[in-house]
């Protein structure tokens, strides 16, 4: 009986460190910026006023989904994508390791002219 309870718990504990080491894959259209949620759905992105899309997804550094209201006033280095109307659709708060990956485009023009390698999650300038 105890084995039935402890074995799944042991397996879960052993898998947690491995899950923490998984690298998040970012899409090729993800840009880097500084996000400050002011009054949801309003925010500042790189100092300019933006709006979060309805249903926008925000992932923290642990890759857990966060509500925009819990992040009000925090300065967050993020990767983000925009929807077809220019609203912020998806946001990933960066870990220190992710933030160290440079270069990373901050404008759509840079993303169009640079080359993205999805396997290594790196950008190369022309």
Image (cartoon, grey):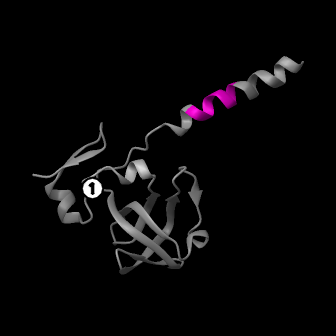
Main secondary structure of the magenta stretch? helix
Please tell me how crowded label 1 is: few (under 14), some (14-19), or many (20+) other residues with Cα within 10 Å. Answer: many
Question: x, y percentage for residue 105?
Answer: 25, 59
Residue under pointer 1: 104
Residue 56 shown left or right of residue 123 in the figure: right
Question: x, y percentage for residue 17?
Answer: 58, 34
Examine the rendered structure and indicate whether residue 10 appears above or below residue 78: above
Say which of 119 and 82 sits in front. 119
Residue found at the very far left of the displayed protein: 126
Q: Which residues are magenta?
A: 11-17
When asked about the image quadrant of residue 16, the answer is top right
Residue 82 shown left or right of residue 75 in the figure: left
Examine the rendered structure and indicate whether residue 61 appears above or below residue 108: above
Examine the rendered structure and indicate whether residue 86 appears above or below residue 63: below
Residue 91 shown left or right of residue 101 in the figure: right
Q: Magenta includes 12?
A: yes
Say which of 96 and 58 sits in front. 96
Residue 77 shown left or right of residue 65 in the figure: left
- SS of the residue at dot 1? loop
Q: Residue at x 26, y 45 (%)?
A: 122
When asked about the image quadrant of residue 87, the answer is bottom left
């Amino acid at each position: 009986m105890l084995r039935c309870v402890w074995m799944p718990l042991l397996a879960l504990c052993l898998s947690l460190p491995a899950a923490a080491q998984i690298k998040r894959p970012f899409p090729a259209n993800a840009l880097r910026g500084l996000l400050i949620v002011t009054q949801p759905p309003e925010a500042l992105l790189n100092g300019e006023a933006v709006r979060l899309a309805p249903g926008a997804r925000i992932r923290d550094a642990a890759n857990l989904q966060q509500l925009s209201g819990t992040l009000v006033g925090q300065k967050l280095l993020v990767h983000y994508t925009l929807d077809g109307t220019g609203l912020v659709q998806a946001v990933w708060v960066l870990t220190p390791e992710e933030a160290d990956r440079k270069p990373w485009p901050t404008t759509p023009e840079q993303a169009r002219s640079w080359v993205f390698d999805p396997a290594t999650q790196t950008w190369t300038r022309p």
